[in-house]
Amino acid sequence: MRKLLLLLVLLLPGYSIRAQQTYVFREGLISGPCHQYGRTALFTDQLAWQLSNGKLKAPAAGTASFTSEKGELNNWQNISADAEGSFAGRAINNGYLYVTYNASKAQTAILNIAGHQMVYVNGTPHAGDMYRYGWMYVPVQLRQGINEFYIRTGRSWGRQGIKAKLLFPEKPVYISVADSTMPFVVTGNDNSQLWGAVVVVNTTSQPLKDLQIQATVQGKTITTTLPEIAALTTRKVGFKMDASGNGASCTLTLINRKAIDTKTIALTTVNNTRHYSNTFISAIDGSVQYYAVSPQANPNGKAPALFLSVHGAEVQAINQARAYKAKDWGVLVAPTNRRPRGFNWEDWGRLDALEVLDIATGSFHPDPERIYLTGHSMGGHGTWYLGATFAGKWAAIAPCSGYPTLMGYGSADGLIPDSPRNNTEQILLRASNPSNTFKLATNYKAGGVYVLHGDSDHVVSVDYARQMKNILAKFHPDFSYFEYPGGEHWYGDTCVDWGPLYQYFRWHTIPADTSVNEIDFSTASPAISSVHHWIRILQQEHPLEYSRVQLSRNASRSAITGTTTNTGILALDLKDVPTGHSLSIQLDGKPAVNYTKKDGDTLLYLHNGAQWTIGKAPVATDKGPLRNGTFKEAFNHHMVFVYSTGGQPAENEWSLSKARYDAETWYYRGNGAVDIIADKDFDATKYPDRGVIIYGNASTNKAWKQLLQNAPVQVTRGKVTVGSQEYSGEGLAAYFMWPRADSKTASVAVIGGTGLPGMRAADANQYFAGGSGFPDYMIFSTDLLQGNTSAVKTAGFFNNEWKLDESEMIRN
């Protein structure tokens, strides 16, 4: 052990070895409510406003703090932690908890807080523990003397409280296994190349490169080279292991030329008839994720049905799978939503569900006509949402005890407002249109729907099920509805593994495209959902407004008639139209389009204008199914965070801190991992087809010119230009996206400002909240933090050619 400690000193100069110590915060000040974050681009935060404008002063008991919604001035008041170190009570209410630590010298520590939304450490933002797991370990640099911590609290934390402590670990770099992602070792399967993931903590002031993890099971060792771990960060890293020897544990050794830390992690071994977890590398960000399986009982060699089951809030995917008894006619797969709460099955939760569906389809080779979707609670919402979004993908869906939208039932991150109060809110909320299952409800006609809900549910009221029953009754020819008598929110496994529900599934299959002659399909974004049987909506007339296509074709395939809404380019799949066959297409009461199919034709492209005409496929680099905006879309493609080094020291410090803050939030909210690199080290050719997140502006970030010199939105020190419109001052913040010119799929997102006040105003990151809507671009001043919606100077959507369009924007 002495040799290992000495080695650490040699490898990491400037860091002394010490036994781990802990400092628990027990006294503080509290005030609130003073902020409001949620599922929109709009937010208020009086403390963040004070911080961004340089007006935040150290509080004292009895001094003025924030103004209430009624205009009353509140004060800071003393608060003490209980015997367990928890700050609790009614005062913990959408405000801030202020605590301090007097450091005898400048040093690095690990900050661990449970139950908070985020924290400012000496003015630097760090991510919160919204799940209350206590797994958020954040390296922070303490200065000599008083260090200030402003801890943002939520609404309903009073009973649960907030715990905060500083740890002074004995090792500057170490493995943490508290938040591991591990596969089950399944006997009978190939276990020689399994993926796991653990957290590596880097408390040093230097990025760590060329680290390795050796994973040893039963004497078999695999070495995995790790990605770079930025200075003063944690990163969840994947590693390979060979568990073919069915060992009970895996020993992990972290290596930086020589071993610097070792941890042992238990393995779970089951036979292949039991429920199990399997891991995979996610294309979303390159991280290790898992899904759970309830295997088919007594496989008979025939293609099984596939049931995709999406879990409720705070439910692990493996526990979701275990709620189901094995079915002799199908296999059940449960994705994770990236976390037990994750993204409410929207945004990256949606992508996770589709990723697991693709993996399961490739692994279990199910009958393509027997793919089903179900889920409970938040997973019931996921079922309503995924079922409406991907019409035609499911033979039937079965939401159990679920709420239909985040507009009616907001969950932890709040509601999506159901109606705008002004033009600014209208264009911002338009970015949330893909979440509105009510507007997509007619898509449910594509398959069967079985609604199951307990009639005594006090968590998700049965009124939500009754609401959807009334909606379905207006158009759906084949849905079933059952209220379980006396059923509360959870009345045992029966509330998901319900016999009549699976009997209903047996009766339903996905029809072949050739047998579907009536189409009724809606989407809010072709990049989310564009295909339904033999039609494809490739471009909209107005981005993120609802598009709908209602078509009928005759049995001889000689005529198609119908109507469209907000559809710019429509493609028809011609695979079941014979070569040489003539086809008449009449849409929206306009003159008919006549076409004779040629040999090799697969898609017919129809362009909407004064009349419908036959044309070419849209240019791949234009808006469409591969890339359509919004701002959040840039985070979908294995993103990389690029911070600035070309600005003034304070600007560069903000840029790196903000990139760390977003990486911390992405890790904790989405079990993810991100590369954080300096602009001077960024080379676009080394990151092909990856989303790039730029922090700063054209004056500070050296990567700007590579990626954004042709963007119609330009941010420099002291000025923003949006087309011909110019805004000046240091207090302007910017969120916007722009397509990468060297990619057909990836985009660039900018998070920055014209000066330190504007940059600090951009610190909010509720863009990681599931269902939150952000348009293609949004410029706002620090006054937005005070609740002034007119502080949004401009916001909107680019047109299909990625140009500014006056009809798709607002200006204040």
Image (cartoon, rainbow, N blue to C red):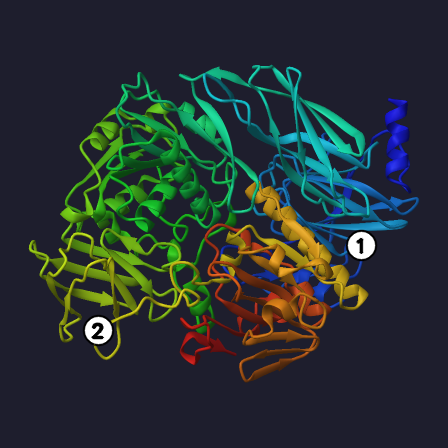
How many residues crowd around disc 2 within 10 Å: few (fewer than 14), some, or many (20 or more)? Answer: many
Q: Which one is nearer the viewer's eye here, 602 or 714?
A: 602
Q: Which residue is situated farthest in the right direction here?
A: 104
Residue 561 visible in the picture: yes
| Structural distance between the alpha carbons of marks 1 and 2 | 69 Å
Image depth: mark 1 or mark 2 in front: 2
Q: Quadrant of residue 4?
A: top right
What amino acid is labelled 2 in the image? Trp
Q: Quadrant of residue 356?
A: top left
Q: Secondary structure at mark 2?
A: loop
Q: In the rendered image, which quarter contains the N terminus?
A: top right
What amino acid is labelled 1 in the image? Ala
- Percent coordinates x, y for residue 537 in the rendering: 30, 61
How many residues crowd around disc 1 within 10 Å: few (fewer than 14), some, or many (20 or more)? Answer: some
Is residue 621 placed above or below 640 in the rendered structure? Answer: below
Q: Which residue is situated farthest in the bottom direction here?
A: 724
Q: Along the polypeptide, which appears first: circle 1 or circle 2? A: 1
Residue at the spot x=25%, y=51% of the render?
443
Q: Which one is nearer the viewer's eye here, 458 or 614?
A: 614
Q: Which residue is situated farthest in the front direction here?
A: 599
Residue 168 tag number: none
- Percent coordinates x, y for residue 47 in the rendering: 68, 60
Residue 612 tag number: 2
Is residue 288 placed above or below 706 in the rendered structure? Answer: above
Q: Which one is nearer the viewer's eye here, 742 or 417?
A: 742
- Percent coordinates x, y for residue 686 in the rendering: 62, 55
Q: Quadrant of residue 366?
A: top left
**Is residue 743 left or right of 436 when viewed as pictured?**
right
**Which residue is identified by label 1?**
60
